[in-house]
Image (spheres, grey):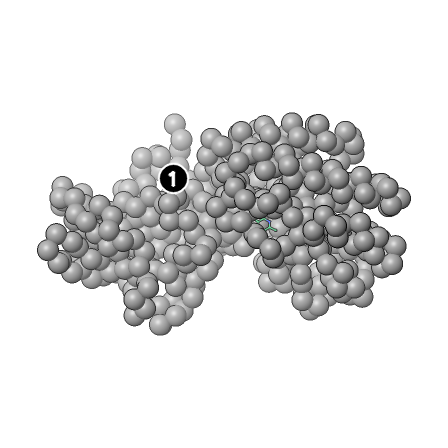
Amino acid sequence: MLSAAKSSRVHKIQKDGMTDLIRSIAAEKHETGQPFYVLDLATIERLMDKWNHSFPNVKPFYAVKCNSEPALLTKLANLGANFDCASLLEIDTVLNLGISPDQIIFANPCKAISHIKYAATVGVNLTTFDSKLEVDKIKQWHPQCHLLLRIKAPSDSGSLRPLGKKFGVLPEEIEPLLHYACYVAGLKVVGVSFHVGSIAQDPNIYREAIANARAVFDVSDYLGIPKMQILNIGGGFRSTPLFEEIAGVVNEAVQDYFPEPYLTIIAEPGRFFPETVFTLVTHVIGKRVRGEKIEYWIDDGIYGSFRPTLYNSCFVGIIPLSLKASEESSQMCESTIYGPSCDSLDAVAIDIKLLELQLDDLIVFYNMGAYSKCAGTKFNGFDMLSTPIYLASTNSS
Ligand SMILES: *Cc1c(COP(=O)(O)O)cnc(C)c1O
């Protein structure tokens, strides 16, 4: 067992006990102005079971950027996860949990030299690349490092957050770049990686990407490079029924395209683990009634957990919660929810139907674990970097 990141009490509750737990934390520990999270550790276990059941042959490297909360990372580490880090600080964070450097992939195709040097110092020896200059930097500063060639996912379409032009070699660049990396620079290219974009909608994108990866293995054989060993299928997964379908397509495509018995298959799930296990609790700090419409101000916003380019509002469940259950309103009103800053763009939800709330009541956001807290700032003097987290463990039965 790795040591817990912070010695925080874990509240053991039934699955339907979340509302009571939230009310009691709000009443006992919190003043308005300070939002907080509740993290359900037991659901992380259930998600890891789900992963292992659907992907028995695919090792998960959790993508730390999605949510780097220490209690989440510790739990995942204890469940046997490996980690995808994109920067010096992410590597440092994961190593400090007691994770071994060979459980880390430095999955950023373009790295600053100082970060490459740090990886070399601490023994993180697997990274991705998609350009000649990256090969030169790695040759000079970390020549022991094993490389995966990052290819573009097919058309990058079909995902809600495509990775667009930024990452991956073009088909015509594959052969010259492999030749350069292996024969000019003398580095070890041991496999291929891709990322179909966050929130994949079409399972067949994975099949196409795996077929493209096969073509790279074939080019490498043709060039006489030592046999590639690693297929990295990236991220894009969510914990929904589509997950099983995607796993079925991936497992079949791997069988069809990769007869190599020695192949290691890895993935970099981000959203899959944290999305559903974090619940954000905010307070109503202001209210204005204009005719039929109500506007609320809460203590989190787009400079905190709700960065519009990152989190996905359509997956978030919004539940108004009166502090006292007996005072629950039954009046549904057209409502807008603003964040606390003086930026007029700082709105969390516009014209949604909500039961009427009063000052100090709570607005609870479910499924808030992916790309939320990690993007927090201190803009306008609202410290969204240190939103506290309370630990829960829900019993599923
Ligand atoms: C962001 C990212 C991930 C995680 O993506 P999800 O869509 O959250 O699963 C995995 N790999 C790389 C290289 C990434 O940049």
Quarter of the image that includes the N terminus = top right
Q: Position of residue 280 (x, y in %)?
A: 35, 51
**Above or below 164: residue 328:** above
Q: Going 80% across and 66% down the picture, which residue do you hit? A: 140
Task: Tell me if residue 103 can be seen.
Answer: no
Residue drawn at point x = 40 percent, y = 31 percent: 396
Residue 206: image location, x then y, percent = 61, 37
Quarter of the figure with residue 125: bottom right
Whether residue 332 is situated above or below residue 375 in the rendered picture? above
- 313 on left or right of 195: left
Write down the residue under mark 1: 12
Question: Residue at 79% of width from left, 64% of height from top?
Answer: 136
Kindly identify the amino acid type of the residue bearing the numbered disc 1. Lys
Give how far across and how far down residue 358 sits, in percent: 16, 54
The quarter in which the C terminus is drawn is top left
Please provide percent x and percent y for residue 37: 38, 52
Residue 393 vs residue 363: left or right?
Answer: right
Seen from the viewer's position, the closer of residues 350 and 300 is 350
In the rendered structure, the answer to whether residue 74 lies left or right of residue 384 reads: right
Count of numbered circles in the view: 1
Disc 1 residue lies near ligand 1 with CB under 8 A: no
Residue farthest along the bottom direction in this orientation: 380
Outermost residue toward the left in this view: 291
